[in-house]
Amino acid sequence: MTTDPVNWPLIPRGTFFEDHVVGRVFDHHWGRTIHASDNLTFSTQTLAFNPVHFNRAAAEAAGHPDEVINPLLVFSVVFGLSVEDLSELGGPFLGATDVTYLRDVYPGETVYASSTVVEARASETRPDTGIVTWHTVGRDTAGQAVIEFHRTNLVRRRTSSTELLAVPDGYAEDFTVGARFRHARSRTITDLDLNGLTLLVMNSAPGHFSEQAMADTAFGERINFGGLTLSLTVGLATQDTTGQAVRELGLDDIRFPVPVRNGDTVGAATEVLAIDPLDGGDAVVTFRHLGVNQRGEIVCQTTRRVQVRRRAAEQPAAPTASSSSLISTES
């Protein structure tokens, strides 16, 4: 079994053109609560200076009970909720039609999304892709539709028959001690991290946000705050490891072997170290998470303990070592 996380088997994310059969329905598993702060930030950053989106008195004068969530934010959130299932693997967003706002959305409401494949055809100019159109509906917690639209994307075709790992639901049974795997997503470090997020958490070390302070040091430039490198490493691993988490119990053995700089891209890999059952049915799963840059260097390491749910007895069992390479210790 290789010890190089770059070569560990991959848990995939996203779907291919062949997965989009006309009539197939995707119930997107996330929901998103839209807060007043989201509405204010989105409206001001897009210069949408309609006062009903950021002035409660103006919204009430217009007959609303509260500020109105910018409908383009509702569109963007519902669209975003669908991306993992429909277009995460890449392919340009080609356009949308029939965008209909079915009712106003207000701060604190949670929206969910589902999509139905309405058309799927081969691309005449790009043989490695197809063109897919979906009908997407956003609903509130009561199931009432608040927005609907059709959108069209280029979607990659499946180009390899290589079997990837099963995507875990995140229950304790999905993991075995010794399993090692990589996570599909990565993220490039930008000024959002070096300036914005560092200052958001009130870290006053100028080495993260002042080029002048770092010019004459051995680094020669700003480096990312280690706490944010840690948070990104854990975050990139979270959906594949703790989708059924009850609570975070702690971290240990946090190390930063190589600094992260502006423009570096960080991915993540995980090893399962221990699974300890708890009274009441849950389990404590101990993971080792590794942050890896674009050069294959480990930039962050941590051990993470999480209380994770087990499946109820009546639910189908998770893939076992004989049926899924996810939990195999071979690679």
Image (cartoon, grey):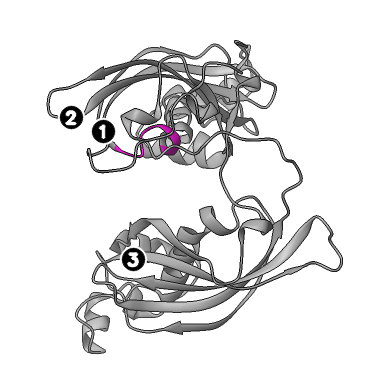
Tell me the amino acid under the disc marked 3.
Val
Instruction: Please tell me which of labels 3 and 1 falls first in the chain.
Output: 3
Tell me if residue 49 can be seen.
no
Image height of 84 relative to 237, above or below? below
Q: Residue at x 49, y 39 (%)?
A: 167
Marks 2 and 1 close (CB-CB < 8 Å): yes
Q: Which residue is mark 1?
A: 310
Dots 3, 1 in contact, CB < 8 A: no
Q: Position of residue 95 (x, y in %)?
A: 65, 74
Please, what secondary structure does the residue beneath circle 2 have? loop
Label 2, label 1: how far apart the Cα atoms are: 6 Å
- Residues at marks 3 and 1, CA–CA distance in whole angstroms: 27 Å
Mark 2 and mark 3: Cα distance apart in space: 31 Å
Q: Secondary structure at mark 3?
A: strand
Q: Closest to the observer: 186 or 85?
A: 85
- Which labelled disc corresponds to residue 281? 2
Q: Which residue is mark 3?
A: 111
Q: Nearer the viewer, mark 2 or mark 3?
A: 2
